[in-house]
Image: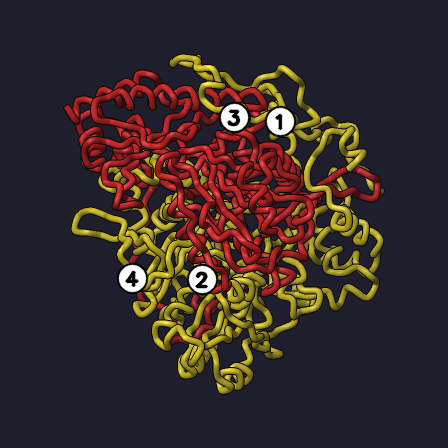
Chain colours: A yellow, B red
Amino acid sequence: MTHKASTHITQNEALVFERSQTGRRGYRLPALDVDETPLDELLPAELRREDDLEGVPELSEVDVVRHFTRISTWNYNIDLGMYPLGSCTMKYNSRLNEKVARIPGFAALHPLAPEEDSQGALEVMYELQQHLAEITGLPGVSLQPAAGAHGELTGVMMMRAFLDARDGAGEEGRRHLMLIPDSAHGTNPASAHLSGFTVRAVRTTAEGLTDLEHLRELCAAGDVAGLMLTNPNTCGIFERDIREICRVVHDAGGLVYMDGANMNALVGVARPGDMGVDVIHLNLHKTFSTPHGGGGPGSGPCCCTEELEPFLPVPRVVRDGESFALDYDRPQTIGRVKAFYGNFGMHLRALAYILTHGNDGLREATEAAVLNARYIAHGLADTFEKPFTPPPMHEVLFTDKRQSRKGAHTLDMAKRLIDYGFHPMTIYFPLIVQGAMLIEPTESVGRAELQQFVEAMKEIAREAVEDPETVLAAPHTTRIGRLDEAAAARKPILRWRPAEKTATA
Amino acid sequence: MRYIPNSPEERQEMLEEVGLSSAEELFASIPSDLLLREPLKTPAALSEIELLERFEALASRNSAARRPSFLGAGAYLHYAPTVIDSLIQRSEFFTAYTPYQPEISQGTLQAIFEFQTLVCQLTGMDVANASMYDGSTAMAEAVLMAERVTRRRRVLVSSAVHPEYLHVAQTYVAHAGIELESVRFDEATGRTTLDGAGLDQTVAAVVVQSPNFYGCVEDVRAFADAVHAAGAMLVVVVTESASFGLLRSPGACGADIVVAEGQSLGVPLSYGGPYVGLFATRDKYARQMPGRLVGVAYDKQGRRGFVLTLATREQHIKREKATSNICTNEGLIALAATIYMTTMGRRGLQEVAEQCARKAAYARRQIAAVEGFSVPYSAPVFNEFVVRAPVEAAGLLRRLAEEHNLTGGLALSRFTPDRPNDFLVCVTEVNKRSEIEALVAGLREATA
């Protein structure tokens, strides 16, 4: 029953290298308006390329537009429909924010332009910092990190620096352990490791919450530098003992880092700073709607308490009376984590998001996002196994336990969802839940589409048991079927090469 | 709120359907003393008209964005064909997530595969990843990778790499047990010299930038033999990717890892980001690379497709043992660079590079001829060079901005206070001859 589009030319677009024809041009530059100095006089031959850029394609502008337009149609996207990837917050990306980021006064501004001639950009950053501080309840903000994992790295390095300043940087008395729930994002342990910490897992309870008793035991054993916690956690549940969790870690002399990936459940409703969190990163490309772009750019600002503020990266964007400035004079800073000041284009979009929503709209979005998740949880409660009982916040976790007995597992049901016109949910995460399906609708989905999603999921659940072959062979409606990823990893082909060279490679 | 499809009435009905009476009850699992009782103290909502007015007013205060500029130093103004921004604004590209589901992400995956190939072609390397945050973090990751490969702890870094790149590397290695040692550059040539640098069997890598921060093209090939003789890796950093169109590729010069800032490839200046880091290496080190990789895969019918591959290096599988913590990278900017390289093509990349070099040479000759000005370094340059003024450079450049409406370059005192009279001038294909002449005239008048 597989009918893939095999003859349609838009479904068989070649690589740009395969499309190249010698002599085609896609550009025209103004004629050179200075002397055409011979290249030999500019640079000796041994410093110049000798391969004539062989292999780089030659295409007309029309070729380029058709090529990228055709391959673009092979992508699912938010504008097409619901994109319920749990923990990814795939909400609507406003066109207005794109327009803001392209205003020439921002887009054409060089990062090393004099501060007095870049006041508008500095004010944008300062204002965004102020709003993020208010939203998180954490007054120190740096916009420098370029993505969530980069913000984590920044936050954890700040914890290291704070502890070293407090306890001394020598081995004696230095704390080594970073506690991380076993349900955490993989970036958490990776960031902790890069900052020189040893990772210890904290167990999750049968209710899907951080095991407070285990946390107490780990803290009592000593050497604890801190805890990295996602809240709501990656099971979509609010850590109701968050105050006590923070108190236990603080009493043990550690700090609490919060992974802000799930802030879309909290904006305008509750603030990490009020919970006892010391430092958090935000994902502007999740909560504040800057586009994911097929894998970035992101932006991962770091927000922290006054105690941790001296350790934020430099330069800081500060206000000096009526003007704004870059401040490098922070002796306790961890240093720079990126050239220049962060992904400024994303700062513009996030500020536009905050100003377009207004304070009431920010809360409204949170309510709508949590309601949508609750609506799905309600709609699928009788169909799929829910591993944990507490009510979900902005995302809901199910498993394939009831469906998998005929051989159709989470992966297969996710692939089948594609045939119903939805992007699959996050699968097999969190790792502690077998056959996990983590569904985050966000606020950007209307009731009718939520209902369609619920019905599609129910239908797939029925198919998984009654007609597992259909589910196992899914998707059926895409231009290619499931790809052999194991073979791809065994003998990786990571670039195009001309045909004759491929044969000998 | 117009971005929320469900009306308040619909939401009330939905609440009732799930057994709740009010939106507050959605948050019943949050302890009540943690719930905000007051609205956030962020501003009230703005309409589209008001919002655009607000941002236009802010943008108008960025006067530097509106005048001819000779700033480079890691961010470059180049011509970017209109099709780039038009194509990357297709919903299918900019509103898609990381391509975890290959069957419905082939557009993104094929574009990344093309990006990886183009990066290999430009750098002269075997394998490139799907992108890093920017050039500076790519350099820091290269240092970490060199330690993983060699199990050695000393890394020699040229003092002519971009100062901010060095600062980023210092932050990244602070807890990795790696010692960064500075390698001096020759005051006559402006080139890095390994003399007295302590290159021996304990060195993991030597890091050089070419063209270096002062614009000088390094003799990369001359480093390669010495570095390899010590069993170390040669890391080459490129901040101006337009140079790939003219300069011998780092791969052809013996580099083991090449990292670059790809902003020059059709990406707006945007006050420093988002940009895109290029990261390329030799085949034998592919499994030690940070970041995502896209590879060829086939379906059951033998149709070619692309998937994320070699993921066992990455954080979501390996957690604390991953090669890097990077997750989200710069996908859409990598796409912009891919469209740029494809549109300009083989000949366009060369023509841009040659125009840059010729215009810079013209400007360099003209400025050097102004009374009191000199160009202190003798090494060949690409499109950037240091000028030594007879007066303090920061003040001179301020006068140029105010009296001639020109950003004349970067006063090096920002990074090296002991060089008060030096400034860095960058000339690209977008700088017209008339602008260069205005710069020269401005320098002459301001010091007359």
Which residue corresponds to the image point at 70% horizontal and 54% vertical from the top-left?
A414
Which quadrant is the C terminus of chain A positioned in? Answer: top right
Q: Are marks 2 and 1 on the same chain?
A: no
Which numbered tag is attached to residue B218? none
Give the foreground label among 3 and 4: 3
Circles 1 and 3: CB atoms closer than 8 Å:
no
> Real-space Cα distance between discs 4 and 2?
15 Å
Q: Are marks 4 and 1 on the same chain?
A: yes
Which residue corresponds to the image point at 41% horizontal and 41% vertical from the top-left?
A97
Where is residue B131? Give x, y as percent: 56, 44
The picture quadrant where one finds residue A30 is top left
Q: Which residue is mark 2?
A: B174
> Real-space Cα distance between discs 3 and 2?
36 Å
Instruction: Let me know if residue A441 appears in the view.
Output: no
Q: Which residue is mark 4?
A: A331
> Real-space Cα distance between discs 1 and 3?
14 Å
Three-letter amino acid code of the residue under disc 3: Leu
Q: Chain of mark 1?
A: A
Which quadrant is the N terminus of chain A positioned in? Answer: top right
Q: Which residue is mark 3?
A: B246
Instruction: Let me know if residue B256 appears in the view.
Output: yes
User: Under tag 2, what secondary structure?
Assistant: loop
Q: Which residue is mark 1?
A: A56
Where is residue B94? Give x, y as percent: 53, 40
> Real-space Cα distance between discs 3 and 4?
42 Å
Circles 4 and 2: CB atoms closer than 8 Å:
no
Give the foreground label among 1 and 3: 3
Three-letter amino acid code of the residue under disc 4: Pro
Give the mark nearer the N terminus: 4 vs 1.
Answer: 1
User: Under tag 1, what secondary structure?
Assistant: loop
